[in-house]
Amino acid sequence: MLALVLVVTGAGCAKEEAPPPAADPQGDALTAPVAKFPCVRFEDLARHLPKSLPGYEPAGIEGSSGRYREVSISEAEQVYTGADGKEISVRIVDTTLAEELGRAIRAAARDAANRDETDPTRPIIHHDAIGFVRYDRVNQRAEANLLVAGRFVVAVTSRNVEGTAEVRSVANQMDLNALALLR
């Protein structure tokens, strides 16, 4: 879902201002003004990924920051592997598409708001975050997608793990308040 929404939607990191026009249109490309990158760099996002998860080994952090036409995005992801093919990944994304992503995440959480406290797909609500949880029993895949501070998307996904308890636990253990302070 997150990947689909990222491809289909548009606004979020810090609002980007266009650079002033160059005085000489034939000027040197090396001296032309460059717009400030509006997203938090992936190295800074990576500092907010869990260092370890009980019962899992970290398999390495990956990340990138870039622009794709008018869309800017930074993301950092850590994958953790466990016994019997179990896997948990945690991805933090900052993008100029955050506004649209936020609407989708809030709507999904709102739709699930009346679910019973024992329902494994009830929404996750923190001081600075709101999110939804899904579970595919056939493929043993769970995911929690949270919007943090109206800007950052945190996606916690498990594979070959029964239920949603693991993704909920990881999301609840993350310091989302510290992430919310990034700018």
Image (cartoon, helix red, strand yellow):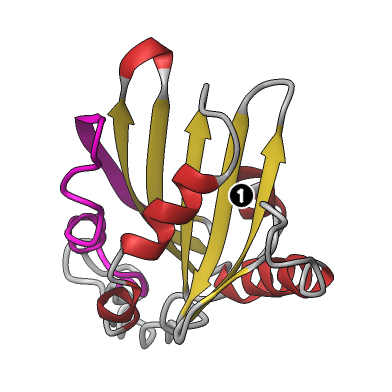
* Foreground residue among 107 and 37: 107
Left or right? Give the position of 24 relative to 86. Answer: left
Q: Nearer the viewer, residue 8 or 49?
A: 49
Residue 162 on image: x %, y % = 57, 30
Confirm whether residue 59 shows in the render: yes
Q: What's the residue type where badge 1 is placed?
A: Leu
Report the residue marked by disc 1: 2
Quarter holding the C terminus?
Answer: bottom left
**Residue displayed at 23% across by 39% down:** 54
Picture coordinates of residue 46 (x, y %)? 22, 54
Find the magenta span and give its range: 37-65
Secondary structure state at the residue bearing disc 1: helix
117 up-or-down from 150: above or below: above
With respect to residue 68, does 81 lie above or below?
Answer: above
Q: In the displayed structure, would residue 11 be above or below residue 64?
A: below
Q: Residue at x 30, y 79 (%)?
A: 24
Hey, which quadrant is residue 113 in on the image?
A: bottom right
Give the camera-side residue of 97 and 143.
143
In the image, is residue 101 above or below residue 24? above
Q: Which image quarter: residue 86?
A: top left
Drawn side of residue 166 relative to residue 138, left or right = left
The residue lying furthest to the front in this view is: 118
| Residue 70 visible to an observer of this rendering | no
Is 172 magenta? The answer is no
Q: Is residue 47 magenta?
A: yes
Q: Is residue 137 left or right of residue 81?
A: right
* In this rendering, position of residue 105 left or right of residue 182: right
Q: How many marks?
A: 1
> Residue 147 in the image: x percent, y percent?
53, 71
Q: Position of residue 169 (x, y in %)?
A: 41, 54
Bin the neighbour count of mark 1 within 10 Å (Cα to Cα): few under 14, some 14-19, many 20 and up: some
Q: Residue at x 32, y 16 (%)?
A: 83
